[in-house]
Image (cartoon, rainbow, N blue to C red):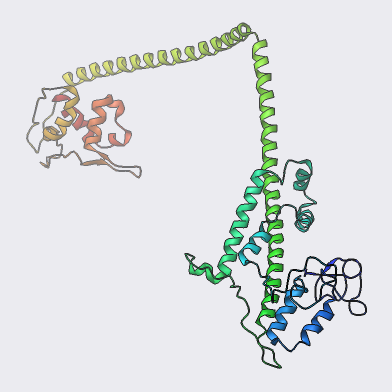
Amino acid sequence: MGGVYCPECEAEVDAVAKFCLACGHNFLNGAGPITSTGHDLGELKEAIKNRDDISMAEKFNLMAQIEEGANPIRLGIAAPAEDDESYEGLPYLEETEKDEDEDVSVNLMKFGDSAASNYAVNTVVGSSEAWELVKSGKINFSDKLYRESMTLGIDASKHIHDISTGEFEGVDADVIKEIPVLKPPKRSFCPKCGTDIHSYTMMQWRKWRDASADVVGIQLEAAMETSIVKISAFHINEMEDIKIENSKLKAEVDELKEKLENTDRKSIEDKLRKSLTTKIRKELLKELKAEKDLILNKEDSEDDEDVEEEFEEEIEKTKSKPKSLFGPGKKSKKFDGKKSDKPEWFLNEALDTVYDPHGTGKALKRRTILARSSKGNVRVEDVVFAYSKSGKKGISELAWTSPTTKYILEAYDSC
């Protein structure tokens, strides 16, 4: 709004308005806006235009000052009333410009009580649960923390405003590119007479700047309020859920404590002792039975082996040993050492003592194959190790298909 008023209701109106927003008075058909001293704005402008003692630029400057609310009497345009004691002279072209930074900071810092921002927040968040928290007072806009957060947001916006007005010191170049620069209008001239009308242009610039600052301030306040309401509602709801869960857990803990206090420990111990003792006894009996069976099986197998060995020794003593018709007699070697080392010694040192029925003269080797099958081959070392470990029972049926197996066992026993 400017510094002029409606002649009907005395409401503040814009200097270029066509009618009053408060009472609807039409300025085009009726009386136009008036100044604070009661002078008609249109008549004052005509008086300024008709003056020949000042330049066109000075005329525009006077008009701009009157529209902004300057006193036309002090400017020397209108005469004071006879009983007006407030008149103190005629300071020519009085300066009414204000500090730009001060105006911007004042406009931006007036937040918290804006009806427009409250309306915007209510429109966006009014239908959600967050607004109910605002009504109930759980989200309090007058709280110190809320004010401090809003102040930080204002400081951030002022920093952006400073960059837009040309304060680039210490700012990254990429940031400067993203922020539009707000520059005042350049010097302009009247198209008819060529007079400089920069003062009037600056007045329009100041009006636009102040109006835009107000709008930006309201937008910023509404945006911050909305975001704070949303975030606060989320965290408040989370806290409420945590409180409910904590109360439930406390109730459960109390119930468990009561149950533990009321339970009879002796009866529980007796029940557990009975059930556990029966289970443990069954498991122990099973283990003892299994161990007993293993011991009996081992004794039986050892007895069988002893009987077989005695029987084989008797057969070997009574059995005649024919000599080969084609080759020399058998060689004999004796092993002196541990029983566990005999198989390896026999394979390395005494394979030449194995009877050769065909007289070929070829000595057996430990890897010589005695019998073949699809499941695998039987070699000399397989027969020796199996016989030393388990006796004849350990030798497979495939190995018995070779007559050499019998001669290997005879040579092994003779050593």
Spot occupied by residue 192 in the image (x, y as percentages of width and height)? 71, 93
Residue sitting at x 78%, y 88%: 50
Q: Is residue 256 above or below residue 247?
A: above
Residue sitting at x 72%, y 57%: 222
Spot occupied by residue 101 in the image (x, y as percentages of width and height)? 61, 64
Residue sitting at x 20%, y 17%: 314
Query: With 60 as the anchor, is 186 left or right in this view?
Result: left
Tag count: 0
Q: Nearer the viewer, residue 3 or 171?
A: 3
Query: With 263 as the anchor, is 36 left or right in this view?
Result: right
**Which residue is situated farthest in the left direction here?**
328
- Residue 56, can we see it? yes
Q: Quadrant of residue 300?
A: top left
**Which residue is situated farthest in the bottom direction here?**
192
Q: Is residue 16 above or below residue 190?
A: above
Spot occupied by residue 316 in the image (x, y as percentages of width and height)? 18, 21
Query: With 250 as the anchor, is 80 left or right in this view?
Result: right
Q: Nearer the viewer, residue 146 or 187?
A: 187
Spot occupied by residue 117 in the image (x, y as percentages of width and height)? 75, 57
Q: Nearer the viewer, residue 330 or 297?
A: 297
